[in-house]
């Protein structure tokens, strides 16, 4: 390895490790006036900018998938890549774009936890929330609206338990820790046992596509 690469790697590693376990100030909450002045529900409209950004992203994703030609092509690539390729759609390009977009959203979620929740980077700071995200995908059945409902359900339960404890309700520590995951398991069992609802899982989900040479 050239000396400059070794020095760059060591310097980058030292910089990253220097930020480990160091608290950050985070982002200040923004009030949506006059909605923030409403009784009872006014606190819902006092959030940090990333929360408002997620609402914008959700609306954009729903519009993209349901109202645009790009969304239709993306669905075609996931459902039948052979037919999409025959129609002149770049299967590899759309799949890579979807992976990059999904990875960016996951990175945004990780940044939310580090900057706004724990306000520092520490080992295992996610606390197993990744498994809740996997369960959310199963619950959503590839529907953005069901994903929104599931996220509000799981997130609301996780936020509700500490609030109950703060009001004086005595709850065992392990009950508080296990509640979000127990509810997640119950929801997964309910979804798996439901035979009336059909899943909108893409037909080619997880299947690699190798473009054959056209004759």
Image (tube, grey):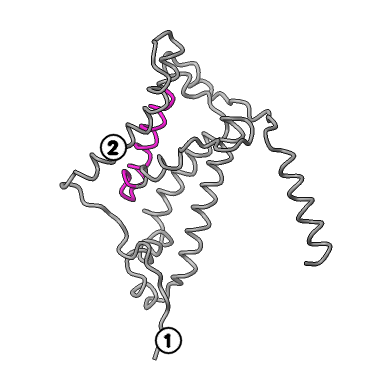
Residue at x-position 43% and y-position 72%:
89
Place of residue 23 in the rendered image (x, y in percent of width and height, measured from the top left): 68, 29
Q: Which mark is residue 61?
A: none
Q: Please provide percent x and percent y for residue 104.
A: 55, 50
Q: Residue at x 42, y 76 (%)?
A: 210
Tell me if mark 1 has few (under 14), some (14-19) or many (20+) residues whose alpha carbon lies within 10 angstroms of its own: few
Q: Which range of residues does the magenta coloring cover?
A: 138-159
Neighbour tally class for label 2: few under 14, some 14-19, many 20 plus, Cα within 10 Å: some
Single out the residue that lies furthest toward the top: 168
Residue, x 55% and y 37% (percent of image)?
124
Residue identifier under label 2: 187
Q: Residue at x 31, y 37 (%)?
A: 185
| Location of residue 132 by image quarter | top left
* Secondary structure under the numbered disc 2 in the rendered image: helix
Outermost bottom residue: 215
Q: Main secondary structure of the magenta part?
A: helix
Position of 24 relative to 14 (above/below): above
Left or right of 29 on screen, residue 142: left
**Residue position for label 1:** 213
Q: Give the spatial CA distance, label 1 vs label 2.
A: 45 Å
Location of the C terminus (image quadrant): bottom left
Q: Is residue 71 magenta?
A: no
Helix, strand or loop at mark 1: loop
């Amino acid at each position: 390895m050239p000396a400059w690469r070794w020095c760059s790697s060591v310097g980058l590693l030292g910089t990253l490790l220097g930020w480990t376990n160091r608290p950050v100030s985070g982002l200040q909450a923004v009030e949506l006036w006059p909605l923030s002045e409403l009784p009872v529900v006014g606190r819902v409209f006092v959030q940090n900018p990333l929360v408002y950004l997620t609402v914008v992203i959700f609306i954009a994703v729903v519009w993209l998938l349901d109202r645009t030609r790009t969304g239709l092509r993306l669905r075609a690539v996931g459902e039948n890549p052979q037919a999409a390729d025959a129609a002149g759609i770049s299967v590899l390009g759309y799949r890579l774009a979807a992976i990059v977009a999904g990875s960016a959203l996951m990175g945004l979620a990780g940044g939310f936890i580090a900057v706004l929740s724990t306000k520092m980077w520490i080992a295992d700071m996610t606390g197993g929330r990744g498994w809740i995200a996997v369960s959310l995908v199963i619950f959503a059945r590839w529907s953005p609206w069901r994903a929104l409902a599931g996220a509000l359900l799981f997130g609301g339960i996780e936020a509700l338990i500490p609030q109950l404890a703060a009001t004086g309700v005595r709850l065992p520590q392990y009950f508080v820790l296990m509640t979000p995951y127990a509810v997640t398991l119950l929801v997964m069992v309910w979804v798996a046992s439901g035979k009336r609802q059909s899943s909108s899982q893409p037909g080619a989900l997880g299947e690699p596509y190798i473009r054959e040479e056209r004759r």
